[in-house]
Image (cartoon, helix red, strand yellow):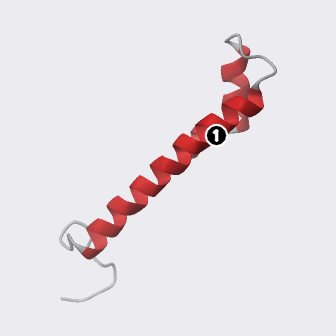
Amino acid sequence: MSKMVSPQNIATGVAVTNLRGREGTCLVRTFLHSLILALMLSAVVAAQRELFHWMAPIVGSAK
């Protein structure tokens, strides 16, 4: 997900399109998507840890 907001990828993306000089706009728009995806992934991980214990075993615990 962090690859979406990497400066190299943004520079490449605007270079091959007609968005030259608008790197800041592209960064802001992709950053919002990246933030939303990070929050969604965090919710999935939290659900796996708290609700679905069998999906994410605790490392180092002896049963």
* Residue 62 occupies quadrant: bottom left
Q: Where is residue 57 shown, x and y percent of the image?
A: 26, 74
Work out whether 3 lies above or below 58. above
Q: Nearer the viewer, residue 56 or 5?
A: 5
Q: Residue at x 17, y 71 (%)?
A: 54
Q: Residue at x 66, y 21 (%)?
A: 13
Q: Is 40 left, or right, of 14 in this rendering?
A: left
Residue found at x 70% / y 10%: 18
Q: Is residue 5 above or below residue 54?
A: above
Q: Is residue 54 above or below residue 25?
A: below
Left or right: residue 21 compared with residue 59: right
Residue 1 appears in the rendering: no
Q: Secondary structure at mark 1?
A: helix
For the residue marked with disc 1, what is the amino acid?
A: Val
Out of 54 and 32, give the one closest to the viewer: 32
Observer-nearest of 45 and 32: 32
Q: Residue at x 46, y 56 (%)?
A: 39
**x and y percentages locating residue 23 in the rendered image:** 75, 28
- Examine the rendering and report whether any part of residue 39 can be seen: yes
Quadrant hosting residue 41: bottom left
Residue indicated by mark 1: 5
